[in-house]
Amino acid sequence: MSLKSSRRRTAAGIVGSLAAAALLLSGCSTSPDSGSGGESTVTVFNGATGTITENFNPFSTTALQPTLGVIFESLYWYNAAQDEDPVPVLATGYEWNDEGTELTITTREGVKWSDGEDFSAEDVAFTFNLVAETPELNTSGLSATAEATDENTVVLTFDEQSFMQEPSVLGNRGIVPEHIWKDVADPITEINSNPVGTGPYTVESFSAQSYLLAKNENYWEEGKPAIDKVRYISLENADSASAALLAGDVDWMSSFLPSLEKLIADNPDLSYVNTPALTTSIFTCSNADLGCSGPQTDPAVRQALYYGIDREQLNALAGGGFAGTASPTLVLPERDARWISDTELTETPSGAEVDEAKRILDEAGWTEGSDGIREKDGERLSLSIQTVSGWSDYISLNDAMTQQLAEVGIELKPTQLSWNEWNNNQTLGQYQLSLDSIGLQPSNNPYFTYDKWYNSSQTAPVGESASAGNAARYSNPTVDDAVRTAGATSDEAVQAEQYGIIQAEIARDMPYIPIYVNSMLTEFNTSNAVGWPSNDDPYALAASWKSWDNGVILKNITPAK
């Protein structure tokens, strides 16, 4: 996705005042018992700044982040940090019929809601039927109705073959209690101040600056959670958060911190994990037939951009050395290597291949002008590239690429915009190049990347919204057919064959030019709690802003001795 929802950028330097941070935090500590009286508490900064708006409605796109995974649970959980099978949560099994139109789910026994009522398959059926009957809640295009056939079995029926709905259905839907939600007057606008869920925590108190979650005493997993309370706070900015981390006032946050290794070395209670999962890419408005204009509509120019950048240098200058190697297939080379069909497409070049970039441009008729910038048919090879003001690492990327690409005769003109303007330009196709990233789909199966970003059905002419994903306006019938075939089967061998077809096409056409797999740094204070994910044991995606995974982490950490 274009990170409109998943990306929480908090690039920062350690320049904040510890005293100021302490003051901010003292203002946030509304609960008198935080960390006192033998209770264990962890404090989380998940990127919230300014006033917090109360909303624990699991159907709402603006629900507070711990609503999904910490308070409400899904049937299964998909770990984006590594390649593994989905983990059972409120379900213990599922099976499709041969046609892919009926999904039978076995629900977990012995689960109670946080108010003490029993959970059953009826709650699951109610949840899916509520979504089916309320189009405003159906943001994923789910076309299923549900029936509980006994206390622990629910059958979902789809209008059409729907194998690829599986991760959305099983892993991205918070199940609600029928005995509460059947009486909710408007499930669209309900803020659900006193949520009743099956997750490890419930809401104890809320203010516009912070909110406190308390252990769900009825939680179904024996012995969990071990931490009594979790406080989510809002801070003024990332600098304040960094200072708060160093002061020991924040236990969990995700931010790019310059000189992180030294900070860790100087602070024995701090640790970090890096779980890169998002491929930072140059988005190109690639399709002249759909209204894109500029040199980037020439595939040769996109190829030259691909070969003309020095990724190793970019990582050093902008990525802090923490970025991973990307793949021209947009599949993560380490986590998802099994899905890459051609080993030559496993990784992007590390250094600039200037001669290759020049050769491509020469053959395409782009000749060097008097100032070194190429031109063709009177058009100068000059491109604007947009990013968001304040995204300091991406601003550094643009500055470095401007110098690198001048060597092959490409002029890059970076611009910085507000997030809204940047996002609007990208969605409407009113840009030439844009910096963004791709990753974190419903599951690690490449179908979701290829369908969202490359399928013709997900785009629109320039000037119309391509909010479904395909901001590049890419259109390729061969890719469309392969996406359709892969989505019509649960046979991974058939899917892999189709992905190979897609990968050959997109590596040639390059509508999205991968730079590197951006770091996803998360920092922990281990003086209050231990058992956080590590680089050796990424049992969940550690980012403090990641829904679903937060619940897994919070129920597995334990108080420090």
Image: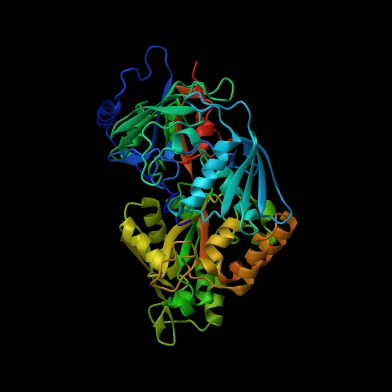
* Residue that appears at 36% across and 52% down: 391
Residue 224 appears in the rendering = yes
Residues 532 and 186: in front is 186
- Across and down, in percent, residue 344 comes to 67, 62
Report the residue at 43% width, 50% height from top: 5
Q: Is residue 301 above or below residue 422?
A: below
Where is residue 499? Give x, y as percent. 66, 62
Can residue 335 be seen at all in this image of the molecule? no
Question: Measured along the vertical axis of the image, is residue 501 above or below residue 376?
Answer: above
Residue 470 vs residue 55, the one in the foreground: 55
Q: Is residue 343 left or right of residue 21?
A: right
- Choose between 396 and 522: the one closer to the eye: 522
* Percent of width and height locating residue 528: 44, 21
Q: Residue furthest top?
A: 37
Toward which corner of the image does residue 193 lie, by quadrant?
Answer: top left
Residue 367 location, x and y as percent?
A: 47, 83
